[in-house]
Image: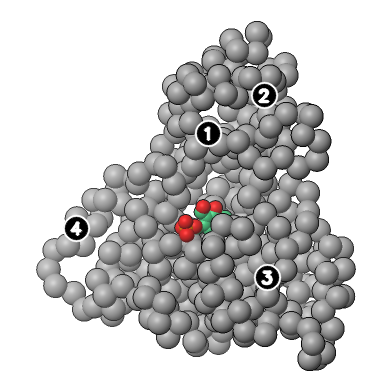
Amino acid sequence: MQFSSDNAESWAPEVLEALAKAAEGPLPSYGDDPLTEEVGQRFNHIFEKDVTVFLVATGTAANSLAFASLCPPYGAIFAHEAAHVMVDECGAPEFFTGGAKMVALPGDAGKIAPDTLTHALSHFFEGFVHHSQPHVLSLTQATESGTVYSPEEVAVLAKIAHGRGMAVHMDGARFANALVHLGCSPAEATWKAGVDVMSFGATKNGCLAAEAVVFFNPDGAASFPYLRKRAGHLFSKHRVLAAQMLAYLEEDRWLKLAAHANAMAARLGGELAGIEGVRLWYPVQANEVFPSFPGEVAAQLMGEGAAFHPWIVPGDPAQGQMCRLVTSFKTKDEDVDAFLTATRRLCGA
Ligand SMILES: Cc1ncc(COP(=O)(O)O)c(C=O)c1O
């Protein structure tokens, strides 16, 4: 009953096979190889426009280096208060930007509301030398609460940000899961809604370690090659990243893997919601479920071998400790069944 994280799973077999195949023969290094060239073309096709793509090995590197290319040290980056960039990257965004200010915005279910952004920006006076200057809005898709911004919601926020001359970044560590939920095209979910740069996640959903930074406007990408090299993320055997990404994107594998994870979460969440005493804190839209359980049930489930994390409780703690359960491309039906059976038994249902 493994629901601790989508990072706890390994990788898709096709990705590993692609790596073995990519080992044949010498190839040019540092990204001058044909596999990396093909990755670029694949992303052009997926996003229906010419984009500029860079591969790195972690999501923290993707986010932080994207910020470094968009934001000077005196700039400010706005993100949800629970965003990975805000709380789980150990200051890497501040470090790689040379000290930009991270501004945490509150918001229900992991999302930033337009009024919240407008209000926060009103405290940063344009051209006022004593204030950090707003440069980036970062949106997480899917959010840390497992919810998904619609393209319309992204567009409203992007309009506000662009109105202040800011760039819009999307942390798409779970972009595939979000896209499966939305059912729209990758272009509609991103640049057509006003996203300028995205961190396109692949590790959580089937790769060993591969993420892409995608610039929808090539002009913004000029400094990125140097920033990536300086950060030690320009892989010499670059095909290691490219082969993973190609296998991930091939035949819509990324969407099929995410569809499986989402379906597992929908079933888990849907059935948990029907058990008396169990409360779901957020709608299940991607591959994460946030329930609280009555009494000692959460601890008992863990005692029976279920792996999941207690999570931060917003609002009234009397309503029970919120937990986070994550499904993945590898989650088995049997694991969902076993978890539901144990929960029903422990809840006396
Ligand atoms: C929303 C989000 N962004 C980015 C990341 C990437 O983090 P890492 O640097 O561990 O690959 C994660 C991983 O947990 C995440 O949940």
Mark 4 and ligand 1: say if the CB distance to the nearest ligand atom is below 8 Å.
no
Q: Position of residue 267 (x, y in %)?
A: 58, 28
Q: Marks 4 and 3, how far apart in space?
A: 42 Å
Q: Which residue matches tag 4?
A: 21
Q: Which residue matches tag 2?
A: 293
- In the image, what residue occupies the spot 17% across and 62% down? 23
Mark 2 surroundings: few (<14), some (14-19) or many (≥20) residues within 10 A: many
Q: Is residue 147 visible?
A: yes
- In the image, what residue occupies the spot 28% across and 64% down? 240
Front residue (pair 188, 11): 11
Instruction: Indicate the amino acid at tag 3.
Output: Met
- In the image, what residue occupies the spot 67% across and 42% down? 312
Mark 2 or 1, nearer chain start: 2
Front residue (pair 239, 39): 239
Where is 328 relative to 115, above or below?
A: above
CB under 8 Å between discs 1 and 3: no
Colour logic: one colour
Q: Which residue matches tag 1?
A: 308
Q: Marks 4 and 2, how far apart in space?
A: 47 Å
Mark 4 or 1, nearer chain start: 4
Nearer to us: label 4 or label 3: 3
Q: Marks 1 and 3, how far apart in space?
A: 29 Å
The reply, left or right, for residue 228 in relation to residue 110 is left
Q: Which residue matches tag 3?
A: 102
Mark 1 or 3, nearer chain start: 3
Q: Position of residue 316 (x, y in %)?
A: 81, 36
CB under 8 Å between discs 4 and 2: no
Mark 4 surroundings: few (<14), some (14-19) or many (≥20) residues within 10 A: few
